Image: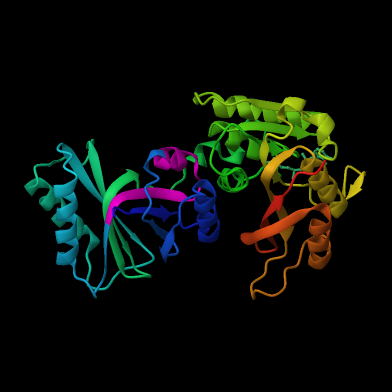
Amino acid sequence: MAQTLACLRGWHVGLAQAELVALFPATKFEELSPRLMLTNQQPAKELQQSLSCSSGIQCFLRDVELINYPKQNQTTLLEKVSGVLEKFPMRGSLAVRYLRIAGRIDGVSTKSLAGEIGSLAVSHGYSINLNDPEYEIGLIADGMSNTIVCGWLIGDFDDSIGTATRRATERPFFRPISLDPRLARLAVNLAGGPIDENAILDPMTGTGGFAMEAITMGRNCLAIDMNEDMIFGAKQNIDWALQDNDVKSNFQMSVGDACNLVESIPTMWHGKISGVVLDPPYGRNSHGTHGHFELISNTIESARKIVSDNAKLVLIIPIKPNKDNDELELLHGEWDNFKQMMVSSGAEIINQWQEHVHASLSRLILLASISPQD
Ligand SMILES: C[S@@+](CC[C@H](N)C(=O)[O-])C[C@H]1O[C@@H](n2cnc3c(N)ncnc32)[C@H](O)[C@@H]1O
């Protein structure tokens, strides 16, 4: 059966794997190595769309053939690739792209192998065009698992994610709190799953980091902040991000209170929010009204009144860097109390990841399910 491979970016493999699972909930992936995820299923239709909205997926290979070197040799791979070229004749111009991840495989020159695959393609009637080919074959050599994979390439091997154009510091409205688009995009996908008619809720939008990613990938999105200046600036950011983008999404951005979402979010969206992304203010006290945990817990309880079934929450909080994998230390408050607060607010933690920020700060990224309540 034809197999499809997802090749993940290397900046945070754990998060990238979680994003892949969130975007393809009905597809079972097998981990060949941390950045290579293989499936027998054929999610072909959504591959291109998922790739364009994803943060952690670098590319897909379709009709994949693979070998584990040196148990199987490169001739075996060439025979398998020849079989693919026979089976799926797509005459035209072609380029073979190659990528090495996680170090070298001793005895394998990925470049020479790519050349041999190119020659094979020519013998099957293709012409080579490296600049503007009709088709591309991708060849990936993974030094960690000694796997060499080859298939029709969807996407490219460029590791720089497209969100670089929306870097926080380049936006018309920048504040030090602004989230990096790479993480913001990933969090939106973790919370929202596959893009559908439901909306993403960003209840403390600040400069609009999550909202900008949700909207530019075509998701419906509702964003509020209690600070009018933030809403004014976040709207400027959204206009700026959409200037060369013709995606269609419904979005609303307004002043509102995350602790009273029933009032702050238009009724037409109640029950139609499948993902909540939350980046609360740091510090013990936000705006003098609530303590840190209380603000989060009130927001979760308030969100549960308007979310859809099976809604997910992604919450980002600051922690102390944890080099030795010791118990987590939050920057504000105790981790055990935090977990207790999540349980009593009705949020069930599904998974958690850490991301390094600088010597004295890391982030905890939590994925939780939040069931609706009346
Ligand atoms: C850490 S910032 C969010 C940063 C944002 N992710 C970004 O990319 O710019 C937290 C935001 O929460 C807002 N906030 C605090 N309490 C709030 C509340 N009860 N309701 C709505 N917004 C609130 C603050 O005004 C602040 O803009």
Q: Quadrant of residue 219?
A: top right
Give residue 204's position: percent from left, percent from top: 75, 39
The percent coordinates of residue 242 (x first, y second) are 55, 26
Residue 178 percent coordinates (x, y) = 67, 42
Which of the 4 quarters of the picture holds residue 83? bottom left
Q: Residue at x 23, y 35 (%)?
A: 132
Q: Is residue 23 above or below residue 263?
A: below
Q: Is residue 56 magenta?
A: yes
The count of marks equals: 0
Q: Nearer the viewer, residue 234 or 63?
A: 63
Q: Quadrant of the N terminus?
A: bottom left
In the foreground, 67 or 137: 67
Query: Can I make out residue 289 in this image?
Result: yes
Q: Position of residue 43 (x, y in %)?
A: 40, 45
Judged from the image, the quadrant occupied by ligand 1 is top right
Display colour scheme: rainbow
In this image, 166 relative to 325: left or right?
left
Q: Is residue 54 magenta?
A: yes
Instruction: Tell me which residue sits at (44%, 42%) in the image.
Output: 51
Residue pictured at 68% horizontal, 43% vertical: 309
Q: Which residues are magenta?
A: 46-64
Q: Is residue 266 visible?
A: no
Left or right of 188? Residue 222 is right
**Looking at the image, which residue sits at the far right?**
289
